[in-house]
Image (tube, helix red, strand yellow):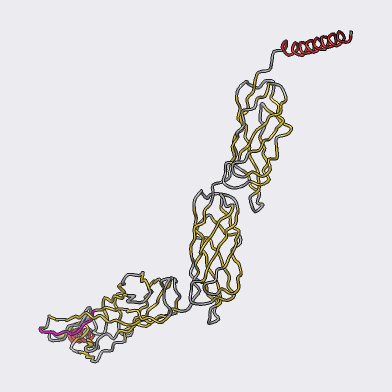
Amino acid sequence: MTYRKEIFLFLVLSLLCTLPVMGVTTYSGGSPQISAVLSGVNEFSPGQDATIGVIIRNSGISTSKSVDYSCTMGSTQTICDSAGPILRDDVPTTAKMVTVGLSADDAPVVVKSDPQNIGDIPTQGQVQVNIIVKITQDATIGEYQLPFTVGYTYLASSTQPAADTLDSTYLRENVTFPIAIKITPTVQINVTSFVAENLSVGTSGYLDLTIVNMGSDDGREAIVKILQNGNSPVIPVDSSIFIGDFPRHQPVFCRYEVAASSDAQNQTYPVDVVVTYENSYGDTVTSAAQTIGVPVQAKITFSITSPTPMVTQGSDSVITVQYQNTGTVTAYHAESRFSAVDPFSSTDNTAYLGDLKPGDTATARYDISAGSDAEVKNYALDTVVSYYDSLDNSMVSDTFEVPVQVVQKPAFGVVVLLPVVVILVLLLAGAGYYLLVMRKKK
């Protein structure tokens, strides 16, 4: 009895370990069916940087499906009859190793994106790619067809010449689709002249522009804008001017206030110019930007051109200092100031210089005292010039130096004797003159 139970249990377990499975499913026939369609807008304007989106779709359908039931499921693996089919790795309708690329052909377009490898697309699958292009400035209005090529590999056929062998044939296919885009009428700006007035490092000035609409559309409700280009130190203060109608080939003059930051240099910096307008369809659009170079002059500097003034130990003096504008723009309402530090003191250390054009000089007079213990030598006192730029912005120059020489105090005897000698000389001269006049009268 014991053996019968054990044998029965063994047969039940063996039966559970060899349950039949659904079998091996094989798809045959059919191939990838590739299509490509535009995604998003297809209207662009001359000079525009654009992104063209394209959807690649695989709608292939297998024409045959077979299922082999010669396999059973063991406890750890699927067991198939030795004469059964070998499971294929690929489906005939899968597009493998797909590559895509857009070309301009004869369209006024520059394609900036290189051909792309987008991997496999299974049946009923799709992938979107974005391609960066540039519409040329001289693009003619109209519709253009851009060739879009899709290349892919697929399983064309497979045979099983032996129980352990599967031969597969793959083919490479290239299909080209037309992608239609439209070049629409647009305003295209051309800055024909520009002048920067009184613009130097750390100051504000004016930027005068003359622009012409060289496009194929007349702009309405137009606004001409200047924009900071990236991190350019030239920053618009007034950035928008309303000009209304902007007809083709009609020049327009615009004047803006701009500022050059303190970290600018004596060189040319970029500024972008655009026009926002209402087009012929009633849509508000913005033209392609034109970049111009705005020259920035060096920061206004000043120098001392007068001889070194002298101050006597322990005495009060009035010194004169001549300042010169060595910059390239005018300093308005300039005022100088110096710092009197030990051993000097001052009751009047500022002076008004007035308007100083490039190269102009002005003289300042300061009251200064030198301590009796001041050393006899040359000193350098700090000075600055405050002024206004052309737009009445308050500015201050970099600190520079005023040279001052301390001379030795005269000895006491010399100081006392000199006035006495002068008085005696004057008395003698007066007496001689009196005697000469009296003799003439006699």
Report x, y in % for residue 147. Answer: 32, 79
Q: Say which quarter of the image contains residue 87.
A: bottom left
The residue segment tinted magenta is 153-161
Asked whether the viewer can see residue 330, the reply is yes
Residue depicted at 26% across the width and 79% down the height:
152
Q: Is residue 61 left or right of residue 267?
A: left
Secondary structure predominantly adopted by residues drawn in magenta:
strand
Q: Is residue 22 left or right of residue 125?
A: left
In which quadrant of the rendered image does the C terminus lie?
A: top right
Report x, y in % for residue 326. Answer: 57, 41
Labels in figure, total: 0
**Most distant residue in the left direction:** 162
In which quadrant of the rendered image does the N terminus lie?
A: bottom left
Pick the residue in front: 191 or 387: 191
Residue depicted at 49% across the width and 57% down the height:
293
Residue depicted at 17% across the width and 83% down the height:
86
Report x, y in % for residue 223. Answer: 58, 70
Q: Is residue 240 left or right of residue 123?
A: right
Q: Is residue 247 above or below residue 231?
A: below
Residue depicted at 51% across the width and 60% down the height:
271
Q: Say which quarter of the image contains residue 275.
A: bottom right
Q: Does 187 lie within the magenta span?
A: no
Report x, y in % for residue 281. Answer: 53, 82
Q: Is residue 51 left or right of residue 346?
A: left
Asked whether the viewer can see residue 40, the reply is no
Q: Does 159 lie within the magenta span?
A: yes
